[in-house]
Image (cartoon, rainbow, N blue to C red):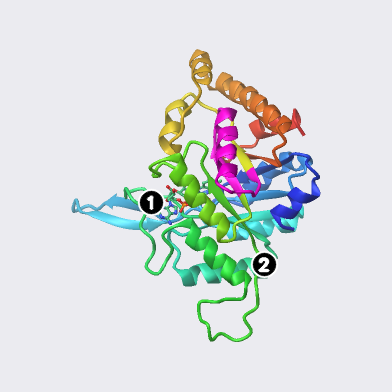
Amino acid sequence: MKVIEHINNANGKTQFSFEILPPLKGQNITQIFDQMDPLMEFKPPFVDVTYHREEYVYKELENGLLQKKIVRKRPGTVGICAAIQNKYQVDAIPHILCGGFSKEDTENFLIDLGFLGIDNVMALRGDAVKSETYFTPERDGHSYAGDLVQQISELNMGKYLDAEIENQAQTDFCIGVAGYPDKHMEAPSLDSDIHFLKKKIDKGATYIVTQMFFNNAKYFSFVDKCRAAGITVPIIPGLKPLATKKQLNLIPHRFSLELPDELIADVVKCKDNKAVRELGVAWCIQQSKELIAAGVPVLHYYSMGKSDNIRAIASSLF
Ligand SMILES: Cc1cc2nc3c(=O)[nH]c(=O)nc-3n(C[C@H](O)[C@H](O)[C@H](O)COP(=O)(O)OP(=O)(O)OC[C@H]3O[C@@H](n4cnc5c(N)ncnc54)[C@H](O)[C@@H]3O)c2cc1C
């Protein structure tokens, strides 16, 4: 079923969902199941599976020269989605990127998803590869998520890259896109970012999932600005419970967002990471309660490979 149908069928009740990462190469899928099992009693209508593009790793050779190696540390997005749908009968949503994909790769990826009975995709640009400052599209690939949304929408209409292809079966994907209450790190302003977000919707995306935020006022103001810009689709808040002291510096740096002073002060007072984890859960429960009261359609949690804290949050809310 499509995300948008899950939302419509819930008749205004807030639903629980979460995002998982494929395991590091070499690990087994049981790691995913162990993470998901404790969360399934909260009946997520859908679960997102992130996509991780290749990275460049430099290895020093005996002669002192550096050898560049291309590695994909977390492959398996599509396989995990198929396994999740098969094991739990919930909709699994693969993330798909512009980065590392030519248009042809994208088309073939989407054909695989369609054959697997996957009805939803989260369309993203992806970040620059770690050793580069700016995002570089693949040769004959897309530069922005909006262009990727356009290609998916066209395939939904049976429009393939090769216009002469026979039959032209239509796909039927519900397309999600990312939104940033703190604005995307490269956007010159929030207004500019929302302008391009609207373009993603105009090209066929039907819901938005936000980047994590720790201050609900940011989300509410973002939603107001989106509505004023003519964006009418559901805007699903993405939440992450803080878990370590280090994240006070890592999260603002990695995701280009601000943490509330009150949260910072409370984390600083914690004597160890166990205390930070408890604080992160309590903070996230408070955020969630306020968002539920405001009638958000879904609360979407970033699990980052661990589910005990998400379980603690879900059990006090759902
Ligand atoms: C919910 C969510 C899930 C994510 N999942 C993953 C994942 O699985 N794997 C992964 O690698 N990354 C993931 N990301 C991170 C994401 O790939 C990065 O944030 C990336 O830098 C931007 O992706 P985007 O789809 O928002 O890009 P875009 O919508 O393309 O926007 C990128 C930037 O370009 C600007 N822009 C957009 N269109 C145009 C245009 N036509 N002309 C000029 N400027 C434009 C925007 O304002 C923004 O600053 C996720 C992010 C979120 C919020």
In the rendered structure, does residue 191 fall within the stretch colored magenta?
A: no
Which structural element holds mark 2? Answer: loop
Callout 2 crowding tier (Cα within 10 Å): few <14, some 14–19, many ≥20: some
Query: Which x, y percent locates residue 150?
Result: 53, 64
Find disc 2 in the rendering and name its residue: 172
User: Considering depth in this image, is 40 or 93 the residue closer to the camera?
Assistant: 93
Marks 1/2 in contact by CB < 8 Å: the verdict is no
Find disc 1 in the rendering and name its residue: 128
Mark 1 or mark 2: whose residue is earlier in sequence: 1
User: Considering depth in this image, is 292 or 46 the residue closer to the camera?
Assistant: 292
Query: Which x, y percent locates residue 205?
Result: 59, 57
User: Considering depth in this image, is 63 or 218 the residue closer to the camera?
Assistant: 218
Q: Which residues are magenta?
A: 208-235
Query: Which x, y percent locates residue 222?
Result: 55, 37
Which structural element holds mark 1? Answer: loop
Is residue 125 rendered to the left or right of residue 14? left
Callout 1: CB less than 8 Å from ligand 1: yes
Residue at 42 percent across and 28 percent down: it is 249
Residue at 67 percent across and 32 percent down: it is 291
